[in-house]
Amino acid sequence: MNVDSHIFMTRSNVNEKNEIYTLSIDCGGGGIKSGIVNNHNELLSDSLRTGITYPFSPADLINIISSHIQQHNFSYDRIVLGFPGMVRGGKVIYTPHYIRFNGPHTQISAELQQRWNGLNLQEFIGQHFNKPILIINDSELAASKVVCGQGTELMLTLGTGLGCSLFVNGSLAPHIEMSHALFSQEQTYDECLGEIARQTLGNSLWNSNVERAIISLWPVFRWDRLYLGGGNSTHLSSSTIKNLEHFIHADDALATLEIVPNISAILGGHKAWELASGQEFI
């Protein structure tokens, strides 16, 4: 999305401390989280989470956001929303979870598919809350908090599915939905690494899948920095992390691996806007 002049903050948007308050919303397949952050990436409100009840429509998303805003009871200047799926210019190209009757990997609803895919989410949310808004992928929002702006930085988020975002020298590369690529036989990365797989396989086999998956992605990206985040990053075993570090360092001694907390998506709200300024978020 080109960040045009009409959505930059005016002087009236800035409080007495010359700070901009950003409502940061992290949308996942299982729940919606939000918090308000300042210019220093500090959380000023409680971090709220509301579980999703399927079927889940755009109107349901608005209702949850409205409820969170009331609970935060904190003035904010702008919104950033991390959305699960492919978004371009604020428009939903495809979302894998919200188009289904009963959540991830269940039957697709033709009605929900029509409501979500192709929706100009930026306009839809903007009309309800009358605030400047930035819509990006949820993995991109989490990455915004931690990327340093040097070299090739890859964020992989482990949650309902697999999130993926790539930054090169601080600029966001075109979005790649790695989760829908085939990983093993007829199963996608999402099906092998997502929450349903973890619950079905157990943590040990799931960790093995994660390890094999990341090793398979090394020749594709050859990152300088790899960040592993999302709610299920807490289930990564120490042996998996050590094995991955050993594998990567055997090929590139300078490449790094960092586990980042799930709160990064909320804390990345302000920085996401800064990264969007002067570049096109795709």
Image (cartoon, rainbow, N blue to C red):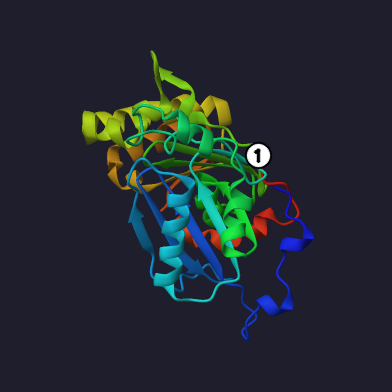
Residue 98 spot, x, y in % from top left: 43, 39
Instruction: Using residue 13 as the reference point, say whether residue 235 is left or right of it.
Output: left
Residue 166 spot, x, y in % from top left: 59, 40
Q: Which residue is mark 1?
A: 173
Would residue 262 be visible to someone looking at this image? no
Instruction: Using residue 79 as the reference point, say whether residue 194 is left or right of it.
Output: left
Residue at 61% x, 73% y: name it.
20
Residue at 30% x, 28% y: name it.
208
Residue at 62% x, 45% y: name it.
120
Residue 83 spot, x, y in % from top left: 51, 46
Instruction: Using residue 270 as the reference point, say whether residue 29 is left or right of it.
Output: left
Crowding at dot 1, Cα within 10 Å, few <14 / some 14-19 / many 20+, comes out as some
User: Looking at the picture, which amino acid does disc 1 mark?
Assistant: Ala
Residue at 35% x, 29% y: name it.
105
Numbered disc 1: secondary structure: loop
Residue 41 spot, x, y in % from top left: 53, 67
The foreground one among 230 and 58 is: 58
The foreground one among 275 and 6 is: 6
